[in-house]
Amino acid sequence: MATQGGYREPSNPAPVSGPGALSQRTDGGPTQGAKYISGLPYGQGQETYSNQVAAPMAGNPMATVDMPTELFAKTTRPNEPITSGVNIGPGPGSEALNLPNTKEPISVTMRKIAQFDPTGEAELIYSTLAEYGY
């Protein structure tokens, strides 16, 4: 007598499950292969490898990304104005870019950048901007 309990790996998992009757299993699918990392302290390389085998990482979801267009290649959008995305000339303005709508002063942005700048140059720019009220 066969039992139905336990985990059953799907043969063809879906990237995203649909609603109701269209739902599909989303677990499983392509994974990255386990890699042995040499040069680690004694025992840690094998432990890392064993962890990768036990819980494999998901495969690359961006595996089919198109290659970038060459600099001097013919356009793939011949009917789009060159000023698309800019607030001058024909075509949609910058609202077409769907950028976040931030109204914070530039000094706030520079303060955030300065936290990660080891040279201290961003801190100087931030203090100058803050001094003049930007």
Image (cartoon, rainbow, N blue to C red):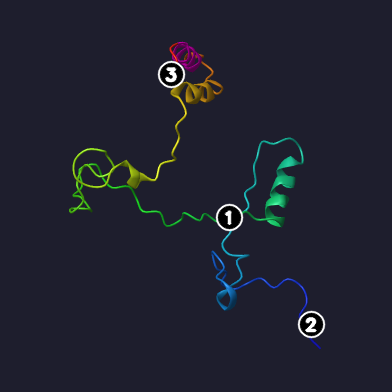
In what quadrant of the picture does the N terminus appear?
bottom right
Label 2, label 3: how far apart the Cα atoms are: 70 Å
Q: Residues within 10 Å of mark 3 (few under 14, many from 20)?
A: few
**Residue 121 position within the rendered picture, expressed as x and y whole percent measured from the top left:** 47, 14
Which is more foreground, mark 1 or mark 3?
Answer: 3
Which is more foreground, mark 1 or mark 2?
Answer: 2
Q: Which residue is mark 1?
A: 32
Tell me the magenta residue range: 122-131
| Disc 2, SS | loop
Q: Which residue is mark 3?
A: 134
The label on residue 3 is 2
Q: Earlier in the sequence, mark 1 or mark 2?
A: 2
Q: Earlier in the sequence, mark 2 or mark 3?
A: 2
Three-letter amino acid code of the residue under disc 2: Thr
Residue situated in front as seen by the camera: 63 or 123: 123
Tell me the residue at 28%/43% (across/down). 93
Image quarter of residue 22: bottom right
Is 41 left, or right, of 103 in this rendering? right
Three-letter amino acid code of the residue under disc 1: Gln
Q: Residues within 10 Å of mark 1 (few under 14, many from 20)?
A: few
Which is more foreground, mark 2 or mark 3?
Answer: 3
Q: Earlier in the sequence, mark 1 or mark 3?
A: 1
